[in-house]
Image: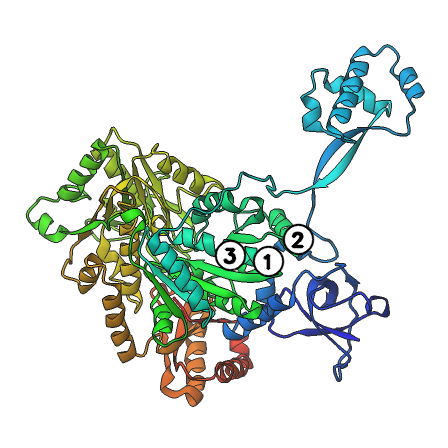
Amino acid sequence: MYADVILPLPFSDLYTYAIPKALQQEIGIGYRVIVPFGSRKHYTAIVLKIHQEAPANLDIKEIHSLIDAHPVVNEQQLKLWEWISFYYLTPLGDVYKAALPSSLIPRDLLNTYTPKTETFIQINPETGIENVESLLGKAKKQQALLEEIRHFLIENDEERISKKELSGLSGFSVSALNGLLKKKILVDIRVETSRLDNDSVSVRAPYPLSVHQQEAFQDINNCFRHKPTCLLHGVTSGGKTEIYIHLIAQFLAEGKQALYLLPEIALTTQLTKRLQAVFGSRLGVYHSRINHNERAEIWQKMLSPQPYKIVVGVRSSLFLPFQKLGLVIVDEEHEGSYKQQDPSPRYHARDTAVMLAHFFGAKTVLGSATPSIESYYNVLTGKYGLVTLTERFNGATMPAIRIENTRELRRRKKMKSLLSPLLIELIDQSLKENEQVILFRNRRGYAPIIACNQCEWTPKCTRCDVSLTYHKKINRLVCHYCNSTYRVPEKCPSCHQESLEPMGQGTEQLEEEVSRLFPDSTVARMDQDSTRGKDSYEQIIQDFQQQKIQILVGTQMLSKGLDFDHVKVVGIISADSLLNYPDFRAHERGFQLITQAAGRAGRKQTPGTVVIQSADPGNPIYSFVTGYDYAGFVHSQLEERKLFHYPPFYRLIRIICKHKDADKVEKITFRFAELLRKSLHERVLGPNKPVVGRIQLFYIREILLKLESGLSTQHIRDILKKTEVNLRSDSDFKHAMIYYDVDPL
């Protein structure tokens, strides 16, 4: 018998091993096995197929050993892995590495997962009562402690006591305990315990739905009778989360599991508390800030007879071993954070979630106030169902949106700050009314660049072709691509003048300016720099909810579904920077971010105001934003995209080539494009140099494929793989990095 296995290496191929006779009755699909690979190495592989077909002309090695007594990956997961590898043109081994917690992929012959243990104390049953008395002698402190331990065990009907409970006894002392242990009257034992928080919490029934929510809830169920995927297009603060809670409760009552996907770890904090209040310990949370051993424990729990019924998580939670998945919710489905960029596999969690649900025969809800154009197009073409929620919860009104022409204000010399006079006035009024303010600037750091005002020299990263961002708090220049840091020069290295000045503004500078304008207010910043600690997201969100923070400055992470009761004013600084990016999705992203940011204001009965600061207020996008005209915006974008052959009418694949030699990367991409044009003709664009042409010492070139939606994925895959093999036969190109980004964002 033979097993085809997946290795945790960047290979798409399966490798075949002979199954030793001793393991033939024990091994199965989805089991982990240790296999030899190469001359000296061993790896943990996953069994994908068992058969009796011996590969021809190959010296087959045997599986070294079996790790598990049961599969750690189920049939639906393996189907999902294969689909991701096929559709996203990514090695199956990379999917395996991304899917399993790293501590479940032991290196060599060692299992790196270490269970958590706790020390307990119990009375030694082998020491008789008569021996105890003689051993204790006149040790009164030891006698007293022993009596307390006996009393505790009888009262609590326990056989042992934890060290924590023991230290709480009145007669406890380290010397008395050590004396009892040394005399073997007591023994200490280590017991495996869970790292997971399994404490049950008080559970309430879901809140009753409003009339509008109830209609949407019923419409989703009606949609599920005809289509497995439903797009819930609901206004910000429309109460989508409560609808999700009712849907989850419904599927749990049917004995099914639910997966609730979020785009950012920051969002799990608020949502987990709301869901735990209803579902208690049936809820599990899974994301990258949980350590490797905790993730392994959650994985093992999902395989157990008592798995979590609901999992809240980000992209990686798609890979968990669900047993009876019935419902998948993708909240804020439009978010670009759902697309994995680096490392491989470069999958989109929203689209992968739809496939995961398909493999389980489950239902999917995609929710957003600003759905992605691809998802809305799937509604228009009949692939998805649509349910709309047009009213805010409890009759709250949508905020008024004001456009401030910063160019005109500067011309008239009325713009004396980063904030317009109107925004300053509204913030001041809001603070007097004990309300809160959110200010968005989608660029972190103090200033995007520093420049010499004499010769225009700007510092650049030595490893990447990109300007360095000035971070004032640490007084360093930082590359936002490779995270290298540099000291700030005192003089311009080019003209040797003391003429370096920060240009532009980031969240750090905005925070400083707001603190200057409103010195009596508590100002905080929420961006990638201020939330590096494990609990930093949670602390900032909690402090803002409790109104310990009055003004919160941040990047786009603040716009992603957070719910705050007392935000009256939202300011969007330099809004044009969201729209003026050389990308066909720039207007879609800008519309979504501005609309989502606006949705943080006036979420209760107090009407809110949104101020958009723009030097180009005539941009047509602003008319769609101020009129809350999502449908009009989408239709205008669809017309453009159809004309210029962009998604959703065409499918894009980026081919990225990297090499440390600039000449070689030029040659390989030109040769690659030349070979592809023989089969794909005008569908091949490039090669081109991307906006940032060198990152971490690697020169980068790209080829873009624009493919009609009806073209066979298998056909395109075969062409690309055949061309790459042809290309790599040239020794000059053998060691170049080549990878594919399917449906790039």
Residue 165 percent location from the top left of the image: 68, 26
Q: Nearer the viewer, residue 91 or 3?
A: 3
Q: Secondary structure at mark 2?
A: helix
Q: CA distance from mark 2 to mark 1?
A: 20 Å
Of residue 467 and residue 84, the one placed in the foreground of this image is: 84
- Write down the residue under mark 1: 255
Q: Is residue 725 visible?
A: yes
Which secondary structure lies at badge 1? loop
| Closer-to-camera residue (532/224) | 224
Determine whether 291 is above or below 42 in the image. Answer: above
The CA distance from mark 3 to mark 2 is: 26 Å
Q: Please, is residue 496 above or below residue 78 in the view? A: above
Amino acid marked by disc 2: Gln
Q: Earlier in the sequence, mark 3 or mark 2?
A: 3
Amino acid type at circle 1 is: Gly
In the picture shown, does residue 164 fall above or below 651? above
* Tag shown at residue 300: 2
Q: Give the mark nearest the N terminus, 3 or 1.
A: 3
Residue indicated by mark 3: 250
| Residue 25 percent coordinates (x, y) | 82, 68
| Numbered label attached to residue 351 | none
Residue 204 pos. (x, y %): 50, 42
Q: Point out the image quarter for the C terminus.
A: bottom left
Say which label, 2 or 1, has the lower sequence index. Answer: 1
Calculate the distance from the C-alpha at mark 3 to the C-alpha at mark 1.
9 Å
On the picture, is 652 further left or further right than 160?
Answer: left
Left or right of 410 in this view: 3: right
Q: Give the amino acid type for the residue marked by disc 3 in the picture.
A: Gln
Which of discs 2 and 1 lies nearer the camera? The answer is: 1
Q: What residue do we see at 37% from left, 47% from top?
A: 562
